[in-house]
Image (cartoon, grey):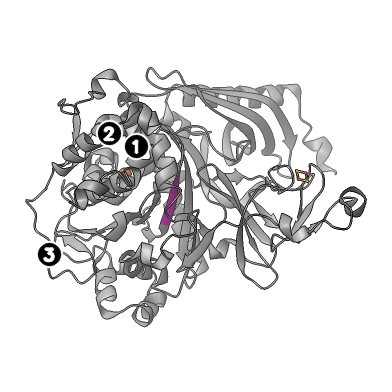
């Protein structure tokens, strides 16, 4: 792949450009780059599989994807969650095609082998007659996802057995996850994630959430026209853009005054005392001032915690989404609604409506996002985007703010926090990590010089 | 069972309701959303749960705990009004859309002014110069109410047949 069309020289030019804050546009949808990404990024990073509240009772299961690997998550009799490759060990048939359910055993429709919730092969049709007594069943158990770990209820898998622990990978993001997911003692997922297919590249969608509040005023201008969002073109820019370790990032959007627009993101007063209980004073300070949290975990998990409503009310919710790559110009979007377990039921219902009215495929904000994502892939494949020397002018300029905005030393949270969200600090960090993964082993010589 | 005779579905009534649904589709396809809102009662319930894949023959595969729409007339009005702004980019330039409404089945209810109406929909749209034709299909279960000699939609539940939606977004009404 890499040797065919993307040689070492090309990587060096890419690196050079990126050091100047320039990202050639062709890399967005290049098919060879895409193959590299799947192998070298998705083969080694932690990927989101689901939330613990999606698996309620023993025997509960959900099916997911790690790009092209079908994954079966099951709660066993002891309440532990296992993740298996959703493929029968006999001839490889997909074992379970349902989105979710509850079972004691999974029986393959092809020849009838069955597996329990621990992935053990427990039944072979006419076993002794076909295979004789000496077959060792334990050798045919379902294949486990090499690494499965969770943090704040978020279950992640990693195909690399030697990967650093999830908590180390999340690094500084943990501190913000503790706010987003742990502020009131835990979140719960409502129902199934919404799923749809968008004409988009996973890097652009991930960047949109992790790094781009600047798009809000224009892409979502219809909400300004409707009188829902403020007129001030800087309204999504107040606050901090925080660059975190490992390509992660978060935008803590406040307001012009630096104070919250609505106290505690309009969460019901009944759960405010829980925030004090679960958050450190510094975390509480941020939670008390934020209007919107929006960010991402490298490579393809994003989140937004806004305040919204289509009926005049304002409610907060937490939306996680995973961009499953289906090709250089296609993603399957998985979109979870989460809400504080401790919130009153009527608040949860109203917040769900607020979510449907803003994000997800039918969300009035999201609809216009998808339009722009599609327009990016529509134009990125052309010859004029493909200059081998990488010095053609048609590059995505992500220089905005480079070296001009200094980090705010007084920001209470971890990470490098810039005092505005209208800059490309997180985008650059994401791209650096992207290059680090796809070029692994390539720059070793000169780095050790 | 007594109401059965009283609310006999006549050919004329059936035709009126079929015409009503075709008229509704015409308004949506012509982007006359304000006129469309006039077809909805003030106490409208408009929902679209997710379809899910579950095991078992005859098992309920509507995910009642998850939705694409959970709307009232007020929230639909917000959604519709947004499509008249200059910057609802998803519909500017506008998508070309058609609602094909078929298999309309009218049943009476205990209320002589309300009818249970089931229909199938096929929604297709085209956007810009894109070669991809986006589509969605499924079933709608409506309660259509006669108010002052006019038909109105009082309740609509939309059941998509796809568990994974293949339109880029859902800026349409179904
Ligand atoms: S492939 Fe599953 S039992 Fe044969
Ligand atoms: Fe957006």
Residue at 52% x, 43% y is A195
Disc 2, SS: loop
Residue bearing mark 1: A368
Residue toward you, A42 or B132: A42
Identify the image quadrant of the N terminus of chain A. top left
The quarter of the picture where residue B20 lies is top right
Q: Nearer the viewer, mark 3 or mark 2?
A: 3
Q: Quadrant of residue A270?
A: bottom left
Q: Residues within 10 Å of mark 2 (few under 14, many from 20)?
A: many
- Residue A148: horizontal and vertical position, in percent? 52, 62
- Do the residues under discs 3 and 2 have CB atoms within 8 angstroms? no
Q: Are marks 1 and 2 in contact (CB under 8 Å)?
A: yes
Which residue corresponds to mark 3? Answer: A408
Residue in front for this viewpoint, A274 or A421 = A421
Q: Chain of mark 1?
A: A
Ligand 1's quadrant: top right
Spatial CA distance of label 1 from label 3 is 32 Å
Local secondary structure at mark 1: helix
Query: In the rendered image, which residue does mark 2 sit on?
Result: B87
Q: Secondary structure at mark 3?
A: loop
Residues drawn in magenta? A319-323
Does the closest atom of ligand 2 sit within 8 Å of the Cβ of label 1?
A: yes
Q: Residue at x 82, y 38 (%)?
A: B4
Residue A170: image location, x then y, percent: 36, 63
Look at the image and tell me whether residue A248 can be seen.
no
Q: Nearer the viewer, residue A71 or B138?
A: A71
């Amino acid at each position: 792949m890499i040797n065919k069309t993307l040689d070492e020289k090309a990587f060096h030019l890419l690196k050079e450009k990126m050091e100047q804050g320039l990202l050639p546009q062709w890399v967005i949808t290049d098919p060879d780059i895409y193959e590299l990404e799947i192998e070298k990024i998705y083969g080694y990073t932690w990927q989101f599989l689901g939330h613990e509240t999606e698996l309620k009772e023993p025997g509960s299961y959900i099916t997911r994807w790690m790009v092209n690997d079908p994954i079966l998550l099951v709660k066993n009799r002891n309440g532990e969650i296992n993740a298996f490759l959703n493929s029968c060990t006999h001839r490889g048939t997909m074992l379970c095609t349902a989105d979710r359910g509850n079972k004691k055993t999974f029986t393959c429709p092809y020849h009838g082998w069955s597996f329990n919730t621990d992935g053990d092969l427990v039944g072979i049709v006419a076993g002794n007659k076909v295979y004789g007594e000496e077959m060792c069943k334990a050798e045919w158990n379902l294949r486990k996802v090499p690494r499965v770990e969770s943090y704040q209820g978020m279950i992640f898998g990693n195909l690399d057995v030697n990967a650093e622990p999830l908590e180390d990978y999340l690094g500084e993001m943990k501190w913000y996850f503790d706010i987003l997911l742990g502020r009131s003692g835990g979140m719960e997922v409502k129902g199934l994630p919404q799923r749809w297919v968008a004409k988009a590249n996973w890097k652009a969608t991930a960047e949109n959430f992790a790094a781009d509040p600047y798009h809000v005023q224009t892409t979502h201008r219809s909400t300004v026209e409707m009188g829902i969002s403020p007129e001030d073109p800087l309204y999504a820019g107040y606050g901090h853009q925080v660059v975190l370790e490992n390509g992660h990032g978060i935008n803590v959007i406040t307001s012009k005054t630096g104070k919250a627009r609505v106290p505690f993101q309009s969460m019901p007063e009944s759960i405010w005392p829980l925030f004090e209980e679960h958050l450190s004073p510094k975390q509480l300070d941020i939670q008390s001032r934020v209007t919107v949290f929006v960010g991402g975990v490298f490579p393809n998990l994003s989140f937004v915690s806004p305040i919204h409503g289509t009926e005049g009310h304002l409610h907060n919710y937490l939306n996680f989404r995973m961009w499953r790559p289906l090709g250089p110009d296609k993603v399957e979007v998985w979109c979870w609604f989460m809400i504080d377990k401790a919130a009153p039921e009527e608040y949860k219902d109203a917040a769900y409506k607020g979510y449907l009215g803003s994000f997800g495929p039918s969300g009035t904000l999201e609809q216009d996002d998808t339009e722009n994502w599609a327009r990016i892939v529509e134009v990125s494949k052309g010859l004029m985007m493909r200059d081998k020397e990488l010095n053609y002018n048609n590059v995505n300029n992500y220089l905005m703010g480079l070296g001009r905005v200094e980090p705010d030393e007084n920001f209470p949270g971890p990470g490098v926090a810039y005092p505005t969200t209208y800059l490309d600090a997180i985008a650059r960090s994401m791209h650096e990590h992207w290059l680090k993964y796809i070029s692994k082993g390539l720059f070793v010589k000169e780095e050790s010089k | 069972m007594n109401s059965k005779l009283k609310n006999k579905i006549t050919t004329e009534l059936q035709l009126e309701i079929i015409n009503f649904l075709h008229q509704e589709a015409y308004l949506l396809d012509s982007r006359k959303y304000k006129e469309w809102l006039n077809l909805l009662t003030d106490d409208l319930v408009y929902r679209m749960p997710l379809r899910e894949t579950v095991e078992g023959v005859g098992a309920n595969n509507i995910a009642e705990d998850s939705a694409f729409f959970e709307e009232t007339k007020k929230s639909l009005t917000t959604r519709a009004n947004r499509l008249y702004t200059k910057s609802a980019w998803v519909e500017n330039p506008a998508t070309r859309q058609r609602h094909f409404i078929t298999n309309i089945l009218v049943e009476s209810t205990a209320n002589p002014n309300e009818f249970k109406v089931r229909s199938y929909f096929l929604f297709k749209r085209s956007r810009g110069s894109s070669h991809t034709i986006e589509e969605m299909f499924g079933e709608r279960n409506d309660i259509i109410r006669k108010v002052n000699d006019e038909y109105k939609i009082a309740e609509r539940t939309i059941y998509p047949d796809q568990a994974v939606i293949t339109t880029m977004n859902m800026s349409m009404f179904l």
